[in-house]
Image (cartoon, rainbow, N blue to C red):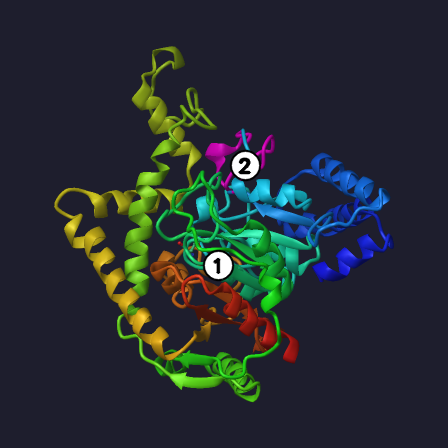
Amino acid sequence: MIKELHEKLANKEISAVELAEQYFASIEEKDKEIFAYLTLTKELALKQASLVDAKIARGEKIGMLEGIPGGIKDLILVEGVRATGGSKILDNYIAPYDATVIERLKDAGAVILGKTNCDEFAMGSSTENSAYGPTKNPLDLERVPGGTSGGSSAAMAADMAAWTLGTDTGGSTRQPAAFCGVVGLKPTYGRVSRYGVMPAASSLEQVGVITKTVEDAAIVLSVIAGEDKMDSTTAKSPTKDYTRYLTGEVKGLRIGIIKEYLDGLNGDVKKSIQQVIKKYEELGAEIKEIALPYAKYSLPAYYIINFSEISSNLAKYDGIKYGMRATDHKDSILDFEPENRNLIETYLDSRRFGLGAEVKRRIILGTYALSSGYYEAYYLRAQKVRTLIKKDFEKVFEEVDFILTPTTPAPAFKIGEKTNNPLEMYLEDIFTVTANVVGVPAISVPGPEVEVDGKMLPQGFQLMGKWFDEENLLRAGYAYEISK
Ligand code: GLN
């Protein structure tokens, strides 16, 4: 899809400004209902697009992403543009600099349409935890688009962007992609810089890509990946033009499946995944049953680690350094005149009124898990379990090249269905968190749709690959995609 747009631009069938205008028209038409975008950056987009047009007019060659419009999850900073991270506490925060991924996209000439909605500070699975209201799934407006990058996945499904960025701490690019029938990629931990990205749980997350096709994911990853002096967790591992590996060939590649995972699925989802497995067999891949005995502890380990790191990372939102400062909130229970108020009271009210319920829940649980006397029993233990799961993966990757699972236990659920039950919401991530716990790259690709209440809805399958082996992961996803 990006390639087609690129060709149209290069052949002067359409100008970059016209292309951006088309996307803004599409947003204007649909986004009142869907609410994928929190902020539009029309002025920036048109300025970027006219630079590309000038280049084309001069007869210069343009890069693959040059002039192609995309949306950016609101956790990622774009200089001079509001960045809320889906939180009220950053309602008035204007990013003072570009995240490294944005710098790279801008250097590549990509056009930025705006900032997409997400669960507050990347906590959730449905985008219902955004302080600005939920995004709707364009394929069924009564359903969630997934989360936390739900604005990005909805923008893709409704043609309100040609590519989008998300972030993925425990599934936040893959699960929303699966719910919206598009592709979501989480790169290997260390593959993409997180400089200028609001952190939730630092040891788990990566910037990811949500696109219509696997090829498009490869195009965007090729631009954003690579070592960054500003983020010491980025790896030296060389990056590539990932599109070069999209051969359509999977002959001889070995795909691991886990029997217990498939047995636990409901009938239609199981059928969908079985069809995917069959397709890979037909394409010449070798399917092998594997066991990951410790993987069943991924979800509890993930949430302990996630809460703990969140409680530490979110301490900076105190009403002093960034965003909203509640010095005189009308609902304050602290009865001080604003001028007599001390610092602690300002912290308390800023956090009380600035942060949402899920964020507070995680800060409290995480603080508990890290506190003296409990640290060993919770955080440290979870980290030890993490090492065991990692060892499982190292062993399995001697036998297979990928692990195939569903992305989610079921297709998109209804808005409001899980909001009162955090545990049920957490269970959404049962298949996705493992890749974050061990740091491997993973992709969600649309598989055969599944019928829910008489309606066909997208169901994604997930491939997890070896550390830093994005090229083969994309290759395998692409081979399935073009075989349909
Ligand atoms: N749903 C998971 C959580 O709430 C994952 C979120 C994410 O990847 N940002 O933690």
Residue drawn at (81%, 53%), measured in percent from left and top? 10
Expressed as whole percent of the image width and height from the top left, the position of residue 293 reads 27, 75
Q: Secondary structure at mark 2?
A: loop
Q: Is there any visible trace of residue 152 in the rendered image? A: no
Whether the magenta-drawn stretch holds residue 424 is answered as no
The location of residue 164, given as percent across then percent down, is 61, 52
Residue ID for mark 2: 83
- Tell me what residue is drawn at x 19 percent, y 42 percent: 371
Q: Quadrant of the C terminus?
A: bottom right
In the image, residue 81 lies in the stretch drawn in magenta: yes
Quadrant position of ligand 1: bottom left
Asked whether 386 or 479 is in front, the reply is 479
Ligand 1 under 8 Å from disc 1 Cβ? no
The amino acid at mark 2 is Ala
Which amino acid, by three-letter code, is at mark 1?
Lys
Q: Which residue is mark 1?
A: 186
Q: Which residues are magenta?
A: 76-95
Going 12% across and 46% down the picture, which residue do you hit? 373
Can the viewer see residue 117 in this picture?
Answer: yes
Q: Where does the image place residue 208, in percent across and percent down from the top left?
A: 52, 54
Q: Give the mark, 1 or 2, whose residue is nearer the N terminus.
A: 2
Foreground of the two, 149 or 167: 167
Quadrant position of residue 279: bottom right
Dot 1 alpha-carbon crowd within 10 angstroms: few under 14, some 14 to 19, many 20 or more: many
Residue 78 left/right relative to 124? right
Give the vertical position of 122 relative to 389 (above or below). above
Q: Quadrant of the N terminus?
A: bottom right
Left or right of 187 on screen, residue 352: left
